[in-house]
Image (cartoon, helix red, strand yellow):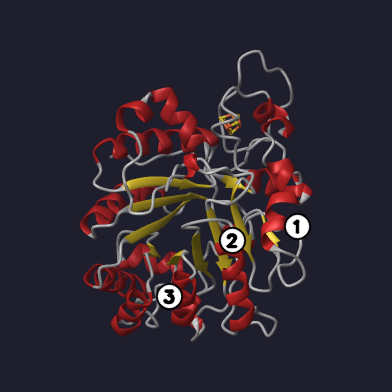
């Protein structure tokens, strides 16, 4: 099922459930500011199953991503994957690259019905990835886990953060994504929340060049590419007319590249708060007290985020606002208003003469050659 085929007023294309904030790693970009211990108020197994029941009522084949922290910090994850699968959900997961990701656990997840496993690579070598992840050995463990996933028949997704620290690595990471046989490369453009505030942001001009480069990679890559928190990739692709030439690559689940926070995307925190995204931590309510489905469809915050005419600044005046809309999470992180312009986009609509987002002093402008 493709996101274009669903009504995002009625249901998210992607529902993320942060099953725990616990994680052994202390990655530099961590949105969750993960900690070693599980939070005592996490949703329990029974509450999680209720949440999955509700997710299933959105409609057939609802996509659910179990994230963290490290979801494998919870022993009940295979049980939750099996339960969700039995309810008709497409269950996927983003485990951390630690030694908890053993071949047996990966096989167990595959046997439970997991549809895809996503692992993160923020460097193409042990030196660069482990520095970013602040953990010696994480690169090797991640590569091994990716290979085990393939052996277990699990489609593989690779997640990569784009920021000043990783930008030189992107061409080599692209090669690694192909070598590992991944079906999808998810390229996350940094939003400065959590520990990610200490990372080096890139400039809008640099982001533009990375997106142009991604369009050229997509034209002959054996995997799909999606951007996270950078829907203006769609605008760049349209301007390059690569959308009609290349079109989206099949990725085993089906996905467009333009869903945004609250509009096709929803995030349930480890304690049950419903946020438009993990990077836009403004709660619409708690799934312990209210229906997930009703909150997604009717909460004022979510309704506003789905209205392209509610957008402010140059995003509100932009002819691409229906296919892009900008990162609402980044607008919120920079201005406190999720409807403001996305400061990472360099596009200025013709005849727009209103205020422009403040520029980022010190942002990385250099893009590595390929
Ligand atoms: S101005 Fe806003 S809506 Fe237009 S392309 Fe840029 S981010 Fe997207």
Residue marked by disc 2: 57
Q: CA distance from mark 1 to mark 2?
A: 19 Å
Which sits in the foreground, 353 or 39?
39
Residue marked by disc 1: 284
In the picture provided, is 205 more to the left or to the right than 32? left
In the picture provided, is 314 more to the left or to the right than 62? right
Does the beta carbon at disc 1 come under 8 Å from ligand 1? no
Q: Quadrant of residue 117?
A: bottom left
Which sits in the foreground, 89 or 20?
89
Which sits in the foreground, 248 or 369?
248
Q: CA distance from mark 3 to mark 2?
A: 40 Å
Dot 2 alpha-carbon crowd within 10 angstroms: few under 14, some 14 to 19, many 20 or more: some
> What residue occupies the far top of the structure in this picture?
351
Please report the residue visible at 47 percent of the width from the left and 34 percent of the height from the top.
Answer: 234
The answer to whether residue 261 is seen in the rendering is yes
Disc 2 element? loop
Dot 1 alpha-carbon crowd within 10 angstroms: few under 14, some 14 to 19, many 20 or more: some
In the picture provided, is 362 more to the left or to the right than 366? right
Residue marked by disc 3: 135
Please report the residue visible at 63 percent of the width from the left and 65 percent of the height from the top.
Answer: 268
Please report the residue visible at 29 percent of the width from the left and 70 percent of the height from the top.
Answer: 149
Q: Earlier in the sequence, mark 3 or mark 1?
A: 3
The answer to whether residue 338 is seen in the rendering is no
Q: Position of residue 250 (x, y in %)?
A: 31, 46
């Amino acid at each position: 099922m493709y996101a274009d085929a669903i009504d995002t007023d009625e249901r998210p294309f992607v529902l993320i459930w942060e099953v725990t904030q616990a994680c052994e790693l202390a990655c530099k970009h961590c949105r969750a500011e993960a900690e070693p211990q599980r939070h005592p108020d996490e949703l329990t197994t029974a509450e999680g199953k209720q949440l999955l029941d509700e997710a299933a009522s959105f409609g057939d084949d609802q996509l659910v991503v179990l994230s963290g922290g490290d979801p494998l910090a919870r022993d009940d994850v295979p049980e939750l994957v099996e339960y969700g699968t039995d309810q008709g959900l497409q269950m996927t997961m983003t485990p951390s690259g630690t030694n908890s990701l053993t071949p047996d656990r990966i096989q167990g997840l595959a046997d439970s019905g997991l549809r895809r496993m996503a692992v993160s690579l923020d460097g193409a070598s042990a030196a660069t990835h482990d520095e970013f992840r602040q953990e010696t050995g994480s690169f090797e463990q991640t590569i091994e886990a990716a290979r085990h996933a393939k052996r277990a028949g699990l489609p593989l997704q690779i997640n990569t953060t784009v920021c000043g620290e990783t930008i030189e690595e992107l061409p080599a990471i692209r090669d690694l994504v192909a070598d590992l046989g991944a079906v999808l490369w998810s390229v996350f453009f940094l939003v400065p929340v959590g520990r990610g505030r200490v990372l080096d942001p890139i400039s809008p001009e640099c982001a533009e060049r990375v997106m142009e480069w991604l369009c050229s990679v997509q034209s002959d890559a054996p995997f799909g590419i999606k951007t996270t928190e950078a829907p203006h990739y769609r605008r760049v692709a349209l301007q390059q007319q690569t959308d009609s030439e290349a079109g989206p690559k099949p990725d085993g689940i089906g996905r467009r590249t333009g869903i945004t926070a609250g509009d096709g995307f929803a995030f349930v925190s480890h304690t049950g708060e419903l946020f438009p995204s993990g990077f836009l931590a403004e709660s619409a309510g708690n799934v312990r007290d209210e229906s997930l489905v009703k909150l997604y469809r009717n909460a004022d915050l979510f309704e506003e985020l789905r209205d392209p005419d509610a957008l402010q600044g140059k995003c509100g005046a932009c002819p691409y606002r229906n296919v892009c809309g900008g990162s609402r999470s980044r607008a919120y992180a920079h201005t406190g208003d999720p409807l403001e312009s996305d400061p990472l986009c360099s596009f200025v609509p013709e005849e727009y003469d209103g205020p422009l987002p403040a520029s980022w002093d010190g942002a990385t402008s250099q893009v590595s050659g390929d």
